[in-house]
Image (tube, helix red, strand yellow):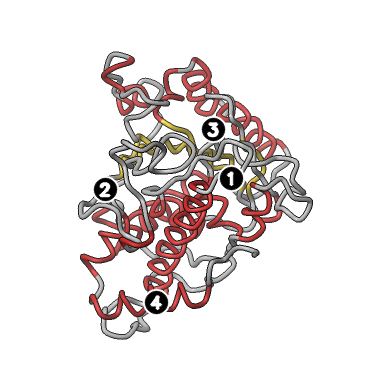
């Protein structure tokens, strides 16, 4: 796939999500920024996800939860792009760090917050908590806290669609640690052999627990690994939600026709592996709503990417609207 060709193609219009029904090609312009209405909505979703995750992190600081919770600040752009790429019959398979994706698909903070409290009013009646949170009503059909476990499960789901002649694709999310598991290579071979409608997305944050790639293993060329079994490989960098959405929509029709695809997206973990950030008195990481929604002034931060492309006054207005609409987003 050549991302430079996106504008030359007629991308399929989006047919599913809680807020959106407008394709990227819509020419209606948002005020000041020059963005289309749809592009403006994607930006709003990124900001809303960041705000919600800040709120969860603040509650983590207060020790409110009795289960391990993995915040995903820095993953908002790819989560929003995936959610908006999905069509009604698509299925999403997640890993332990699933917060951004489940929030994007649910479209509301309260059911997920209540699930983290293990409340019967939670998104899964308090039965799944955080690391295994799934809800088929919004398309998340399976989530696993076991490293590499969800990839063969996704293969099975995709094979089921193919066998039953069902429409839709299966999207599976995993971290860079998962490609070190045997199940990953086996799933590459299996998905290619049976021409499965499968999208494998690897979030490479150079972190597995507290170890970097260089600390734990030799380098692995994911592109070469995919090439060895003739699976298309796409690398995404920069945390630009609009570019990510275009790339995903462009590759989706081929996947639906039986060409599995592997996508490596580079993200940065801007919070601790689990629990609150900061997590201890001398923790060098700092997250606080007092400092605004942004964390880093680099392309590692999806919010910074918005700041670089949207008029500052308009972005401030959008952010204020989101905070006013959502309040704390959490029950008292």
Disc 4 residue crowd, few under 14, some 14–19, many 20+, Cα 10 Å: few
Q: CA distance from mark 2 to mark 3?
A: 34 Å
**Mark 4 touches mark 2? (CB < 8 Å):** no
Instruction: Determine whether the residue tagged by mark 3 lies in a helix, strand or loop.
Output: loop
Disc 2 residue crowd, few under 14, some 14–19, many 20+, Cα 10 Å: many
Q: Is residue 37 left or right of residue 107?
A: left
Q: Earlier in the sequence, mark 1 or mark 2?
A: 1
Q: Earlier in the sequence, mark 4 or mark 2?
A: 2
Tell me, for residue 92, which label it has, or none.
1
* Residue 100 percent across, percent down from the top left: 49, 50
Q: Earlier in the sequence, mark 2 or mark 3?
A: 3
Q: CA distance from mark 1 to mark 2?
A: 24 Å
Q: Is residue 84 left or right of residue 26?
A: right
Of the 4 image quadrants, the one containing the N terminus is top left
Residue at 52% in and 50% down: 101
| Circle 2 residue | 300
| Circle 4 residue | 320
Residue at 61% in and 58% down: 106
Q: CA distance from mark 1 to mark 3?
A: 18 Å
Q: Could you say which is closer to the camera, residue 90 or residue 102?
A: 102
């Amino acid at each position: 796939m050549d991302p430079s060709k996106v504008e030359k193609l007629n991308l399929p219009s989006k047919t599913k999500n809680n807020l959106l029904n407008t394709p990227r090609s819509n020419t209606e312009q948002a005020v000041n920024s020059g963005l289309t209405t749809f592009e403006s909505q994607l930006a709003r979703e990124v900001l809303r996800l960041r705000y919600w995750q800040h709120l969860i992190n603040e509650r983590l600081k207060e020790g409110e939860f009795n289960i391990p919770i993995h915040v995903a600040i820095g993953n908002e752009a790819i989560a929003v792009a995936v959610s908006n790429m999905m069509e009604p019959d698509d299925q999403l398979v997640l890993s332990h760090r699933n917060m951004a994706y489940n929030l994007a698909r649910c479209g509301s903070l309260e059911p997920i917050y209540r699930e983290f409290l293990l409340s019967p009013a939670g998104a899964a009646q308090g039965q799944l908590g955080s690391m295994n949170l799934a809800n088929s009503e919004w398309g998340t059909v399976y989530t696993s806290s076991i490293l590499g476990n969800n990839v063969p499960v996704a293969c099975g789901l995709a094979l089921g669609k193919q066998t039953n002649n069902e429409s839709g694709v299966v999207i599976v999310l995993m971290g860079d640690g998962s490609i070190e598991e045997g199940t990953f290579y086996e799933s590459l071979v299996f998905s290619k052999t049976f021409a499965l409608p499968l999208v494998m997305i690897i979030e490479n944050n150079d972190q597995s627990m507290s170890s970097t790639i260089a600390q734990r293993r030799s380098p692995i060329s994911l592109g070469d690994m995919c090439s060895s079994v003739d699976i298309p490989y796409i690398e995404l960098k920069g945390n630009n939600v609009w570019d990510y959405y275009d790339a995903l929509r462009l590759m989706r029709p081929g996947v639906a026709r039986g060409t599995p695809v592997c996508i490596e997206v580079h993200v940065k973990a801007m919070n601790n592996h689990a629990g609150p950030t900061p997590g201890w008195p001398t923790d060098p990481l700092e997250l606080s709503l007092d400092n605004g929604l942004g964390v880093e002034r680099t392309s590692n931060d999806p919010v910074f990417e918005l700041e670089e492309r949207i008029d500052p006054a308009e972005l401030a207005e959008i952010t204020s609207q989101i905070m006013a609409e959502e309040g704390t987003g959490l029950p008292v």
